Amino acid sequence: MEGFLIFSISILTLAFVYVILCLALNIECGVAGMWDLGIVSYFGVGAYSYAIIVAPEAASYQHYLFGFESNPIYGIALAIVLGGVSAYLIGLPSLRLRREYFLITTIAFSEVLRITFSNENWLTNGVAGIYNIKQPLKSFFTPDNYLILLFVIFLCISLIVYRMVNRLSFSNYGLSLKALRENEALAKTARIEPGKQYHSVYVFTGCLAGLSGALYVWLNTLIVPTQFTPNVTFFVWTALIIGGIGNNRGAFLGAIFFVILLETLSFLNLSAELALVVSSLRIALVGLALILILRYLPNGLLREKPTIIR
Amino acid sequence: MLTVTNVDKFYGGVKAVENVSLEVGEGKIIGLIGTNGAGKTTLFNVISGFDKLDRGSVNFEGQEISNLLPSKIAKLGMIRTFQTATGFPRLTVLENLLVFSDNNNFDFYKNFLNKSEENKEQIDKAEELLKKFGLFEKKNQWVIDLSAPELKILEFARAIMGNPQIMLLDEPAAGVNPALLEQLMEIIKELNGEGITFLIVDHNLRFICDISDFIYVMNDGKLIAQGNPEEIINNELVIETYIGK
């Protein structure tokens, strides 16, 4: 029973990282209608920003910049800032495009960044990655209690992000994004400036993805470039589609549902041969869930609903 | 109020609008007619900032607005409609109006730092408009669920919400049944009585003649006639363009 509890807490803690990514994608895509396949870019930038200043100094056989072993709070702050800055810079060329052209550009940038993480040894230690990144406050707790602490911290952060995203979604700003999503030409006649609105929401998404990248490294204590493949983007999209695009509660729920679905099979106690089969089945199971959701609940578990103002 | 001077608009080698000049006086209803492909909507797009002009100028209230962004032109008090009235399909009827409130603040930082208060005054105004146009019962429904006539009427309510000085209507009579057309004409006349100026593009000659104070006629990108409705319906060039020799 205790093992199951610890397992559940670990899975949910990871799920909260995905919750933040899903909420970020939801305000960008579900609310503003920007079809982005590059959210992993800012997730990666945030993760590396956190890692290179929180990690200890590089050993003689390693190469990476900084390694200040600094306070994780600075790491998280840097992850948010650099996530936003990279989104701002990537947004300058890519936000001139719309729909599928924007989508292709964002996935291209995400691959450029992943290859950069793999090849710039002096900055990231290349494919060997950075590991042994200390978890803050760990020395004060037993391993089990530390898991609970992480669970509580990540839950609180994801709830704060949910509240922030939800507030923005239902503000005048959110209304302008929804208007752009629905009819850009008409939105212009409502005095809405598409360029300004798209760029600001893109940077905001970058900041949130950067935050989730930092939390991901905090949880895993290591970072390697293969953690930032386009799979992450597709996983977040899948989670959002399952939860319900355009609904922040759906995004929250979808992320949790998705991570439980993806990770549960990893922890089944099976024979070696069967484990091999089941590990391949994980992705197939996610695909099946996606197909079933699209077939029977095309708007997701919690669909977007009309906003009742009074 | 609105002056268009010697405007040209080319798409590659195609002259969509050529040397067109027109004037819209304050408080007037001005019609712009022409057959399909005459260049009416292109001219509309140029005036409202959706297309860049290649030559000439557009002045609104004494200010040059040629090639300004549509959102900037809208801020000056010029609101336009589109041929297909779809509105914002997955926003509620009430939200469709609130988007057009002239005191909206869409800035990210302001909305991020302060919870934007529901603007009671604007909601009241929007609800009043919905009552006036018979859409109040549907205020919390998505616009995608409205019928075509309701969408046409919503267009007017939405535009009025933005306190326009001038409304540019792009083919308001297209696809509209006679009963609704009567209703739309009444709405336009009522709003005109309240001080809103109109520039209306359509190819329905009878509708334009019934409602306009002055009419411009376009064909093949050029102005071919102008005058009051009586002059226009008796103009041989107009008759020839519409009916043939």
Image (cartoon, coloured by chain):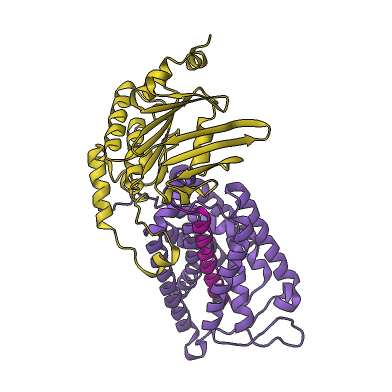
Chain colours: A purple, B yellow
The answer to whether residue B25 shows anywhere in this view is yes
Relative height, residue A274 to residue B49 (above, below): below
Whether the magenta-drawn stretch holds residue A2 is answered as no
Q: Percent position (x, y) of residue A207?
A: 53, 69
Q: Nearer the viewer, residue A107 or B39?
A: B39
- Looking at the rendering, the stretch of residues picked out in magenta corresponds to A192-218
Q: Percent position (x, y) of residue B183?
A: 28, 28
Q: Nearer the viewer, residue B241 or A192?
A: B241
Residue at 61% of width from left, 69% of height from top?
A44
The answer to whether residue A244 shows anywhere in this view is no
Relative height, residue B222 to residue A244 (above, below): above
Relative height, residue B95 to residue A61 (above, below): above
Q: In which quadrant will I find the N terminus of chain A? A: bottom left
Name the side, left or right, on which A7 lies relative to A122. left
The furthest residue to the top: B245
Q: Percent position (x, y) of residue A233?
A: 58, 59
Q: Percent position (x, y) of residue A281?
A: 59, 55
Number of labelled discs? 0
Residue at 58% of width from left, 43% of height from top?
B52
Residue at 76% of width from left, 88% of height from top?
A60
Q: Nearer the viewer, residue A230 or B159?
A: B159
**Magenta-colored segment: predominant secondary structure:** helix
Name the side, left or right, on which B207 lies relative to A111. left
Whether the magenta-drawn stretch holds residue A209 is answered as yes
